[in-house]
Image (tube, rainbow, N blue to C red):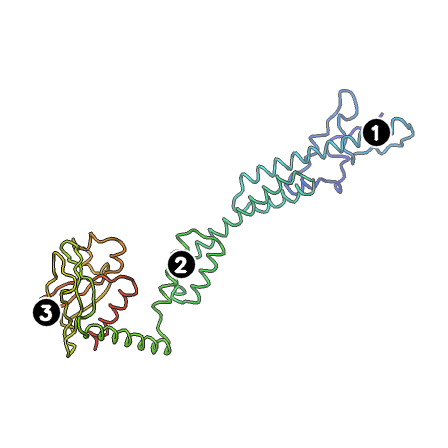
Amino acid sequence: GGRRVSGCEGLPAARAHPLLGAMGAVCARCSEVKKGKGEGLSRMHPDMAESEDSAEGSEGDHSEVAASSDESGDEEEYKQGVEQILKHTGKNLKRGKTMAMREAITTAKKYGLDTSKITEAEKKLDEHKRQQLREEVEKEVEAFFQGDACKDIASTEKMVKRAVDADVGAEVKRRLTEWLDELIITRPLEASEQEHARTYLKQNCREFVVAATREGGRPVVMIDLEDGQKLPVKFALDPPLFNLLIVPDAADQGDRVASMTEVPLKSMVAGRAKDDKKVSKSRGFSVLEDEDVECAVAVRYEAERITGALCFLEPTLLRRDKLIEALAVLTAA
């Protein structure tokens, strides 16, 4: 005796399910409305209520119970559908799909989906967004090094901060930080810094001259570039400060004693031994331990039109640098 419902007729637009709007489905409930064997509906959505009078009491009561039961079943089906969409969207999450994932999470929360599943989906979305940011910033860094902005310290500092905040790859961070260090080290000195540097170099050179001119000279270790043997010697300076003398250390006579060498200061060039091609490629230098390699000083010179190279070993990096600086000031005087 009830009115038959076909298609979507009877499903009010105002009651369209939120999931259908979020996922873009159209009339999804239509497939759930099926005809029974002879008459009526095998399932009934609560919104598809009969418009007839409920004069027959018991039959009306039965209709209300059936509608309530169907609505509960529908809610469970919706939850399962949302869970599947959440799982599928999470697996296929990529650029341009973040909005769909966000909508799926919102719908899942509305229908009380398992909290752990929602948390996992939110974590995937957050990781995806961080990965997107990471890739975008790494591209920005590459473009940064192609422009003139990379020559500016302030601009480089901002790019370093952006890269760190985006958690870019270790190699990208290293490239940026090393470049910033180089910009800072090689920048022109300010007036106060220039004065401080001059004072420091003068004091360092003065200490070296005092040590090299006093009785006995300044102790140092010389490396034999043929076999790497360490020979104790002393630096000495002649009174007019024209020549640097390398003399054997009389207090430490071993199996071998270094021969005395006289090097004109004006022809001398000192630097890190590992950066000097001739010294660093010598047989004696190649057998040094890593710590000694870092602390070694190369001295190039020319005497009577003959060029030579010497290698000296200091105990620390600071002593290495102070020796190089002192010799540089002496040769420039």
Provide the residue designation for mark 1: 63
Location of residue 222 in the rendering, given as x and y in whole percent from the top left corner? 18, 61
- The quarter of the picture where the C terminus appears is bottom left
Provide the residue designation for mark 3: 303
* Type of amino acid under label 2: Leu
Left/right placement of residue 250 relative to residue 140 reads left
Q: Residue at x 85, y 27 (%)?
A: 62
Name the residue furthest top. Answer: 37
- The quarter of the picture where the N terminus appears is top right
Name the residue furthest front. Answer: 251
* Mark 1 and mark 3: Cα distance apart in space: 116 Å
Q: Secondary structure at mark 3?
A: strand
Residue in the foreground of this view, choosing between 77 and 210: 210
Q: Are marks 3 and 2 in contact (CB under 8 Å)?
A: no
Location of residue 72 in the rendering, given as x and y in whole percent from the top left corner? 75, 33
Dividing the picture into quadrants, the one containing residue 120 is top right
Q: Secondary structure at mark 2?
A: helix
Density class for disc 3 (Cα within 10 Å; few <14, some 14-19, many ≥20) is few
Sooner in the amino-acid sequence: mark 1 or mark 3: 1
Dividing the picture into quadrants, the one containing residue 206 is bottom left
Number of the front mark, 1 or 3 = 3
Q: Are marks 1 and 3 in contact (CB under 8 Å)?
A: no
Location of residue 183 in the rendering, given as x and y in whole percent from the top left corner? 37, 66
* Type of amino acid under label 3: Ala
* Mark 2 and mark 1: Cα distance apart in space: 72 Å
Number of the front mark, 3 or 2 = 3
Residue in the foreground of this view, choosing between 143 and 221: 221
Q: Secondary structure at mark 1?
A: helix
Number of the front mark, 2 or 1 = 2
